[in-house]
Image (cartoon, rainbow, N blue to C red):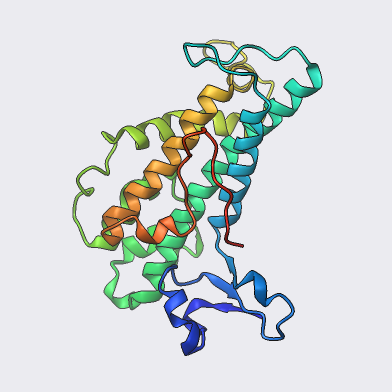
Amino acid sequence: MFGLVEWAPKRYRPLTQQYTLGTRIGIDVLGGRSDLGPVVMMAELLPFTDTITHFNRAFMLSREPEPDGSYPPIDDRKRLQDQESSVRAALTSAYFTLEGYLHALALDHLMKTPFEDIEPKHLVRLMEWDDEKDRFKPQSLRDKLIYYPKIIIGSKHPPPGLDESNRWMRLVLDAKEIRDAVVHPSRHPDPVTHELHKELLVLNLGVERMAEVVDAVVELIFTVEAVVHGSEDRARQWLKRRGEDGLFPPNELG
């Protein structure tokens, strides 16, 4: 049986404090899988599970790194194809994780705050919907990162440490063109340079760049969480940093 955390019976309320409103928690009322515990369904959790699965696979398909930390080319064609596939999947899933997290933040605020207490322009940003024009009003990833935390904490300016001077944010926004090239592939040349820009972005994507971007997404989410909620604790329930071996630990939720 699945339900929103705010509908949970009293005995499960301590569990619900760990997650945003809108999270769905499956509780086995028949006892068929009680040994596995509650199943948590979050918009950001599934893509993060994909991220760590593909990230770890891409790393494990690599040879041992060189002394300078770089990875030598893989000789086996099938192994190389598997690694490249996992690299692309890990990078795009990291961006899906970030967007899912930001959407969860917005929904959490909308569910906790009466609409009349939210400025109309802020409602448009949080809901990505313009009531006056009755149409979808999409927000860019940059706008969500800049405005959502600012709206939620009631600040007129981007919170300290959470603007485009933040190195994690800058890296994630700069690398988004790689994500876009993977998600929206095209053989059209750049109209200005006449180079095959998108294809080159994808072809030049390797393990090192993937790791840099994925790590930046993780740190950026932790940064936003600390600004909005005062600590990283709630995000730590589902979001993990890499271990000393360079791999992500398995995700125990879901």
190, 147: nearer the viewer: 147
Residue occupying image coordinates x 42% and y 29%: 174
Q: Residue furthest bottom?
A: 10
Let me know if residue 129 appears in the view. Answer: no
Name the side, left or right, on which 77 lies relative to 205. Answer: right
Would residue 30 be seen by someone viewing this image from the given angle? yes
Count of number-bearing discs: 0
Give above or below for 129 relative to 201: below
Q: Nearer the viewer, residue 249 or 133?
A: 249
x, y percent for residue 12: 49, 82
* Residue 148 placement: quadrant: bottom left
x and y percentages locating residue 231 in the rendered image: 29, 57
**Residue at the image point whose x is 49% and y is 50% from the top:** 99
Instruction: Give the residue furthest to the right.
Output: 78
Where does residue 91 sit, x and y in percent of width and height? 57, 35
Q: Residue at x 58, y 16 (%)?
A: 71
Quadrant in which the C terminus appears:
bottom right
113 vs 131, nearest the viewer:
113
Compared to 73, does 151 lie above or below?
A: below
